[in-house]
Each structure stands twice: as structure tokens, then as C-alpha cells.
Image (tube, grey):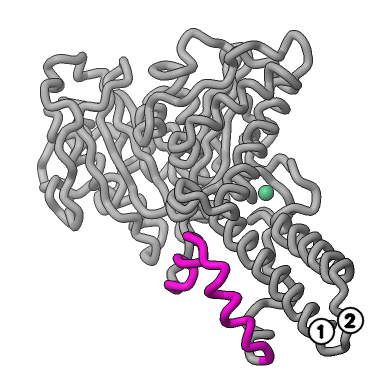
């Protein structure tokens, strides 16, 4: 809360001449230290201070994700001077989100010693109308942000211009100004992490579409009848290549293989009992079961006859379960949900199901890159996100596929490159909205 009589607010703006609308006292940001449940991390660049940059032109940025609100003060060149963060108040309503944004940003601003901020740029997960700063229904933050007029609320409270956009658009601008897309006017940005998203710049401008939400390239269908996506369709890239999707597929592959082998074992038992233990028949059964199981695994679903339902009627089912021990099976037996990291580690240990799930993800991303090359004819395709960055081989594979399969002359050599800015990409990019 701004102290009574104080001539400026936490952002160095006069509260007597607010813009664009009269600020309400209750909207004013808290001073540094208030409700600082999470201590701010140390300045990212300890040798850079506001006196090293043109402090009066620094930009305040916010990155609102599914768990955290991160804030920073960024120089016009894209260098983060100071950052802070707060947990996203997911159960307290939109007003609490706005207050938390102001709290985090106010702290960062004061720690830099900037007299005032030029403006505020906000990166937010999920769809948003960049013209109004109003959020739609972000899928990863629950209902707390749905319909929130974030741009207007922040602008009124901070008395600053506020620009709001989807996190992937902000990230693309960050890579364009400070990262792998420098010097290009036509590029596609792809991020592969807990979801798959992207942004497209053509002729130096981000494409936004009729409603400002263009560029959701993670929902391109690359596998008809494939795993169900969060958007409702089947076979989207996101349903195959995101971290959670990779984990689901690896588990489905394992369960499908277990189901196929179990049915083969029980079929052999039955035939032996009937006196029909003919090798040819067993082989057919195995092949048939395996084929059905593979289809189920591709669809990301458990096989119709899970091992647990048959275990009670077959003592061999239990021994089968232990016989088919693999790194992935071991982790599943622990009862803990699989993560993308688990799959990576199991694949490194040679687990075939983990390897297949990762291969499907890499193929989906590579196929998407070919489509992007054909549709947009970019100079570069920049691939970032926590999942993609941990699999550098995906970049080479996608680049080779574009060169081999994209239409001439869009099939440029080495067109797919890794992103450079890492976790800070949206926080930096929001300064360029
Ligand atoms: Zn989808």
C-alpha cells in the first residue's frame, strides 16, 4: 500500500496524474517485502545495475505461469537486471493475481534502483486478446484467470502502459531480439515442454489472427486416431510430444506389451490343455495380440484386458509381471506417476517402451517442422522448451527431415535450431511486446 502523501507509486509514477484511468488506492502495489512468502532470487546479473543501463527506459515484465508469477526489470537491450517471483494465488480470485503481480514487480523495480519503468509487458500462459489484455480460459491455471481483464487492471494500478500477450508470442519476440532468431524476419518458434506451443513471425510481424490467438501449432494433428489431446482431438503434436504425453505413451506401450504377452501365455495354456499346442497357432496368437496392443498403445490407452483383471485367474500372470521387468516397469511398480524425466532415464537404460515413446515424440516434432516449412517458408525454426532442449537429437532429426521432405525451396539446410534463452525467454520477450 502506498503511504499517504507519497507522491509516486511503487513504479515511480505519480499517483496524482495516473494513466490511463484514475488509479484506485486499494489497487496500489504493496511495498517490497510485504507478503514475500517466497524470497526473491538474487539478481541475475549482479554486476549490472540500473546505473549501467538507461534506467528510465527499463521495462517491467511479468511471466504468469501455472504455478508462479515471475517478474523482472529488463533493459531495452533485453538484459534482466533483477527478478522476483511469487506463487500464483490460484484460489483467491483475479484481484489477488493482480495484486501479486504488482507486489512482485514493485519489489524488482525497487531493487534495481530504477526511478520509473517505461511500461509493463506481460506474458501469460493460455489464450489472451493482446488488444485488450483480457484473458480467455487458460487451460493450465484453472479458473482463476478466466475472463480477467489483466491489462486494464494492471494499468490502472501501476499508472503505466501495459501490454499483454500469450507466453509463446513473448518468447518468440525474445528469441527474435536476443536469441536464435536474431536477424530473421520470417521464423517459427516452437516450444515443447508440459505442452506444445508456438508462434509465427512473417515479414517481421507476429501473426495473430482474427481473435489474436493464431499460432497454436501444438494442436496440429500428426497422427490420425492417435492419443487424445487436451483440446479434445486425437493425434495432436501436444498429445504425443509434451512431457506428460511422453510419459503416458511409454506407460501405454509397456502395458500393451504386457497385455499381449499375457494373452499369448494364456492362449498357449489353453491350447496345451486342449491338446492343441501347435507352434503355428501360438505364433498367430502372439502376433494378433501384439498388433492389437500396439494399436492401443498408439492411441495412448490401456489395453482392453489389463493384466490386473486376469492376474487372479492365472498364476503365470504374476510371474509374467516380474519376468518382464524393465526400468519402466520397475518405476511403475513404485506407484508413483511417471514423468518425462523417468522416461528419459529409462530410455537411456535401454527400455524399449521408453525409447518408442520418445521416438514417437521426436517424429511428431520433426513432422510438424516440415509442415511449418511448407506453410510459412521460414528462414529458421527455433525449437525450445524443457523437453526439446533435453533432446538435442530432435533438432538434428527435424532439420534433416525438413531438408528431405519439405518442398523446394523451403527445404533449407539446417533450418531447425535450438532456442537460446531457456527459462527466461518469455520474461525477456515480454519487454518487446
Ligand atoms: Zn490438441
Q: Which residue lies at the image location 44% right of the left edge and 45% below the top edge?
A: 150
Q: Position of residue 165 (x, y in %)?
A: 49, 35
Q: Which residue lies at the image location 17% right of the left edge and 53% below the top edge?
A: 36
| Image height of 208 relative to 142, above or below | above
From the viewer's side, name the closer residue of 121 and 20. 121
Q: Position of residue 32 (x, y in %)?
A: 14, 45
Residue neighbourhood size for the residue with mark 2, other residues' Cα within 10 Å, grouped as few (<14), some (14–19), many (≥20): few
Q: Is residue 260 left or right of residue 338?
A: right
Numbered tag placed on residue 272 in the rendering = 1
| Callout count | 2
Q: Which residue lies at the image location 72% right of the left edge and 28% below the top edge?
A: 371
Label 2 belongs to which residue? 276
Assign a secondary structure to mark 1.
helix
The magenta segment is 313-335
Q: Position of residue 235 (x, y in %)?
A: 72, 49
Q: In the rendered structure, does residue 307 fall within the stretch colored magenta?
A: no
| Image height of 56 relative to 276, above or below | above
| Image height of 243 relative to 304, above or below | above
Q: Is residue 354 left or right of residue 424?
A: right
Separation (CA) of disc 2 from disc 1: 6 Å
Q: Which residue lies at the image location 26% right of the left edge and 53% below the top edge?
A: 26
Amino acid at each position: 500500500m502506498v503511504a499517504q502523501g507519497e507522491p509516486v507509486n511503487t513504479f515511480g509514477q505519480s499517483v496524482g496524474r495516473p494513466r490511463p484511468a484514475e488509479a484506485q488506492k486499494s489497487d496500489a502495489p504493496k511495498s517490497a517485502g510485504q507478503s514475500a512468502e517466497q524470497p526473491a532470487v538474487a539478481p541475475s546479473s549482479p554486476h549490472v545495475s540500473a546505473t549501467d543501463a538507461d534506467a528510465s527506459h527499463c521495462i517491467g515484465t511479468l511471466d504468469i505461469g501455472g504455478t508462479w508469477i515471475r517478474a523482472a526489470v529488463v533493459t531495452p537491450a533485453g538484459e534482466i537486471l533483477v527478478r522476483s517471483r511469487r506463487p500464483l494465488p490460484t484460489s483467491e480470485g483475479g484481484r489477488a493475481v493482480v495484486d501479486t503481480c504488482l507486489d512482485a514487480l514493485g519489489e524488482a523495480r525497487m531493487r534495481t534502483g530504477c526511478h520509473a519503468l517505461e511500461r509493463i509487458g506481460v506474458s501469460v500462459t493460455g489464450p489472451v486478446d493482446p488488444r485488450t489484455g483480457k484473458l480467455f480460459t487458460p487451460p493450465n491455471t484453472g479458473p482463476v484467470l478466466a475472463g480477467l481483464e489483466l491489462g486494464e487492471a494492471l494499468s490502472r494500478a501501476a499508472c503505466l502502459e501495459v501490454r499483454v500477450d500469450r507466453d509463446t508470442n513473448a518468447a518468440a519476440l525474445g528469441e527474435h531480439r536476443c536469441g536464435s532468431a536474431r536477424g530473421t524476419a520470417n521464423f517459427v518458434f516452437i516450444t515443447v515442454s508440459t505442452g506444445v506451443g508456438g508462434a509465427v513471425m512473417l515479414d517481421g510481424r507476429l501473426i495473430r489472427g482474427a481473435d489474436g490467438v493464431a499460432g497454436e501449432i501444438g494442436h496440429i494433428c500428426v497422427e490420425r486416431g492417435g492419443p487424445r489431446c487436451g483440446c479434445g482431438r486425437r493425434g495432436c503434436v501436444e498429445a504425443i510430444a509434451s512431457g506428460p504425453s511422453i510419459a503416458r505413451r511409454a506407460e501405454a506401450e509397456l502395458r500393451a506389451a504386457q497385455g499381449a504377452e499375457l494373452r499369448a501365455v494364456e492362449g498357449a495354456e489353453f491350447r496345451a490343455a486342449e491338446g492343441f499346442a501347435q507352434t503355428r497357432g501360438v505364433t498367430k496368437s502372439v502376433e494378433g495380440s501384439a498388433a492389437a496392443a500396439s494399436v492401443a498403445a498408439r492411441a495412448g490407452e490401456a489395453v482392453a484386458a489389463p493384466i490386473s483383471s486376469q492376474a487372479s485367474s492365472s498364476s503365470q500372470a504374476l510371474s509374467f509381471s516380474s519376468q518382464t521387468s524393465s526400468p519402466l516397469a520397475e518405476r511403475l511398480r513404485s506407484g508413483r506417476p511417471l514423468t518425462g524425466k523417468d522416461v528419459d532415464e529409462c530410455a537411456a537404460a535401454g527400455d524399449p517402451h521408453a525409447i518408442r515413446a520418445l521416438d514417437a515424440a521426436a517424429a511428431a516434432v520433426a513432422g510438424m517442422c516440415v509442415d511449418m516449412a511448407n506453410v510459412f517458408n521460414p528462414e529458421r525454426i527455433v525449437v525450445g522448451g524443457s523437453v526439446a532442449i533435453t533432446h538435442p537429437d530432435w533438432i538434428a532429426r527435424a532439420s534433416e527431415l525438413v531438408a528431405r521432405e519439405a518442398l523446394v525451396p523451403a527445404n533449407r539446410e539446417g533450418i531447425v535450431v535450438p532456442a537460446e534463452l531457456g527459462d527466461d525467454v518469455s520474461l525477456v520477450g515480454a519487454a518487446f511486446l
